[in-house]
Image: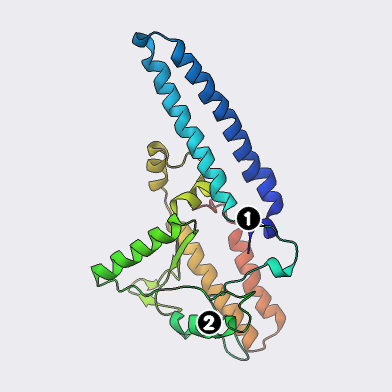
Amino acid sequence: MPWSAKAAELLKTQYAATGVAATTALGATVASLERAASRMPAETRAGAQALLAAAEERRDNATRFVAAYRQYCRPVASLADYRLAPFHLLAAEGAVHADKTHHWHLAELARVCAADPGLLLATASRTVDLADPASEAAAVAWWEGLTAAGGEGAVFKPLDFTATGPKGLVQPAVKCRGREYLRIIYGPDYTVPANMNRLRKRAVARKRALAATEFALGVEGLERFARREPLRRVHECAFGVLALESEPIDPRL
């Protein structure tokens, strides 16, 4: 769903405002430093040129920031302008389908999407064998090509909808976003080495635990709904998720 349909106000007040302010201010800064450097004697020009290089990098980062969020905007005037790409068949009459593999879910949804290709898009996928380095390398190359072309990224999951390991429930999914999409999340200059080093030191264990708990509550809520339990029982799970979302954890992690 395009951001211009679901988050138009956020685009105007946060992303677009930041992009315009940054590109305008940094463009003027670069122009001023270029004039200053050109007027200085060669023996004293090094300092100004260093400032100019830093300003040019920040200007270029701001330009990439604007280009990144524009990837997710397009005119939306009616329902005909929407496109949906489903990837989970959450539930059907009397069944939740959490016992099926992701292959099954995508195959079933591909049949549904074929009924209305103007609105529904089948989600592309590929299987990765973690014991095969060539398979891993092919998946990385696919992801790099996808994100280089403007895609947000890819979601990597175990083959089973719910998988367990020695430590219990395996993380249901990990979203691997591309470099330029992350520029929207962390800011235009997140790729500066000092910022990258800081981001790599983040503690994400609590966020992962929160995601696993919310996943379990979501499946439980669906199962209660499919069993036709009272609505208050379904709402218990939904309110549990809402309560967890109020935890003071950085949502960008």
Residue bearing mark 2: 110
Identify the disc placed on residue 49. none
Circle 2: is it few (<14), some (14-19), or many (20+) Cα within 10 Å? many
Residue bearing mark 1: 73
Foreground of the two, 210 or 43? 43
Amino acid at dot 1? Cys
Q: Earlier in the sequence, mark 2 or mark 1?
A: 1
Label total for image? 2
Left or right of 152? Residue 166 is: left
Residue at 41 percent of width and 38 percent of height: 192
Where disc 1 sits, the SS reads loop
Q: Is residue 187 visible?
A: no
- Which quadrant holds residue 204? bottom left
Give the quarter of the figure containing the N terminus: bottom right
Circle 1: is it few (<14), some (14-19), or many (20+) Cα within 10 Å? some
Left or right of 99? Residue 144 is: left
Residue at 42 percent of width and 42 percent of height: 191
Q: Is residue 182 visible?
A: yes
In the rendering, at what x and y percent does residue 184 appear? 54, 48
